Image (cartoon, rainbow, N blue to C red):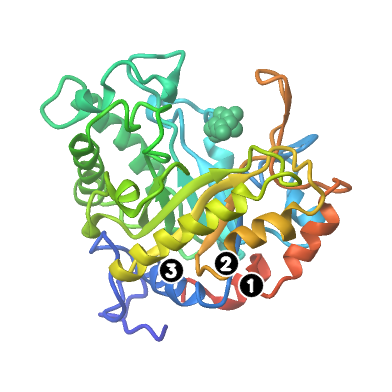
Amino acid sequence: MAALFGANNSFLRPVTGELPADKNATTQTVLLYNNLKKLAGKGYMFGHQDDLAYGVNWRYENGRSDVKEVAGDYPAVYGWELGGLEAGAERNIDGVPFKKMRQFIKEGYERGGVITISWHARSPYGAEKGAWDTTHGTVASILPGAANHQLYRTWLDELAKFFLSLKGSKGEAIPVLFRPYHELTGNWFWWCRNACSAEQFKVLWRFTLYYLSEEKKVHNLLYVYNTAGDFKTKEEFMERYPGDDAVDMISFDSYQYDDPAKSDWFVKNTNVQLGLMGEIAAEKNKLTAIGETGYEQIPFATWWTETLSKAIGEHKISYVLVWRNHGYNQWMKKMHYYAPYKDHGSAADFVKFYQQENTLFEKDVAREKLYE
Ligand code: BMA
């Protein structure tokens, strides 16, 4: 987009282009928002959670990425996770030090990639269950006027500090697709459908946006509404939608659990859901994405071109992100990964997926100059 700036200061927001939910969003954030709208017509970006931090059988080695070792290119979208930051932890819920995360975010952004951040915030009650404590009415307790509201503000203070510390080489704030309270239609987190009313959820969302942008002056966020993969109608998808003025992107998470050799359920269902979401997005002029997906361990050699690619089909979305490559997970007692690594059984098919015209990796998005 040919941006016009209000003054001779590149950090001021452009006076042309549509503004996102945060009307004081920074220049680069507004540019990203507008550029993503155009990019969706060309293809969808591939994203991977924690891509630069670790992979199957390695941890914290400069420049490494399982995706790059297979495809020869980094993902276009980097997913990161803030769970634990609200409580002042030095490492997130999956052991990633926030200091390193900040550096990885900068690296990805400087190469032209897109950053998205989720937040498995701990419930103030269930220390052990963390985000997965659904028994205490946590949402009601943190809303304005309620017992834990001041505590909630301190959580957002920690997040604000982190967001404001994300700086590019010219000192500009790095834009982030912030996806809080993800899978909100599920029944496993304290912000899910079974643990709060639709009204409470909307207030939580709107307060969060207000507090971060107005009180903490965080202006580098685009807000991503994200349901679980369980909706069958537009009404179900939208039941807890906090409002057009509070959301920039709509999305859902959906994983493959059955065997794609025996069932095409994932392909069909995802297609239908993308259709429903696409209609809403067109009506409301919002961006769209599959916030998380994957087939754990990818035990199907052609999952990328035969399943995922078909599941997305001709739908115009901004990105699809696969979850993290933890490797062997002691707690789960199994291998936990969603992107292929070198010599993995689906690696050859992933290269084909990479070569498809409509899949965008880092080199593709670098050419698009999403922040200019
Ligand atoms: C889940 C698993 C967990 C992890 C959580 C938050 O899907 O990967 O191991 O702690 O996401 O990242």
Lower sequence index among marks 2 and 3 = 3
Is residue 331 positioned above or below 23 on the image?
Answer: above
Observer able to see residue 94: no
Label placed on residue 358: 1
Is residue 341 positioned above or below 249 on the image?
Answer: above
Is label 2 in contact with label 1 (beta carbons under 8 Å)?
A: yes
Q: Position of residue 268 (x, y in %)?
A: 57, 55
Q: Identify which amino acid the numbered label 1 is placed on.
A: Asn
Find the distance from the CA under tag 1 to the CA under tag 3: 19 Å
Lower sequence index among marks 2 and 1 = 2
- Label 2 or label 3, whichever lies nearer to me, is 2
Q: Identify which amino acid the numbered label 2 is placed on.
A: Tyr
Q: Secondary structure at mark 3?
A: helix
Q: Position of residue 182 (x, y in %)?
A: 41, 41
Horizontal side of residue 71 vs 246, given as left or right: right
Mark 2, residue position: 44
Farthest residue, direction right: 343
10 Å crowding of disc 2: few (<14), some (14-19), many (20+): many
Q: Which image quadrant is residue 363 in?
A: bottom right
Residue at (38, 30) in percent of width and height: 86
Name the quadrant where ligand 1 sits.
top right
| Disc 3 CB within 8 Å of nearest ligand 1 atom | no
Residue at (45, 17) in percent of width and height: 129
Q: Secondary structure at mark 2?
A: strand
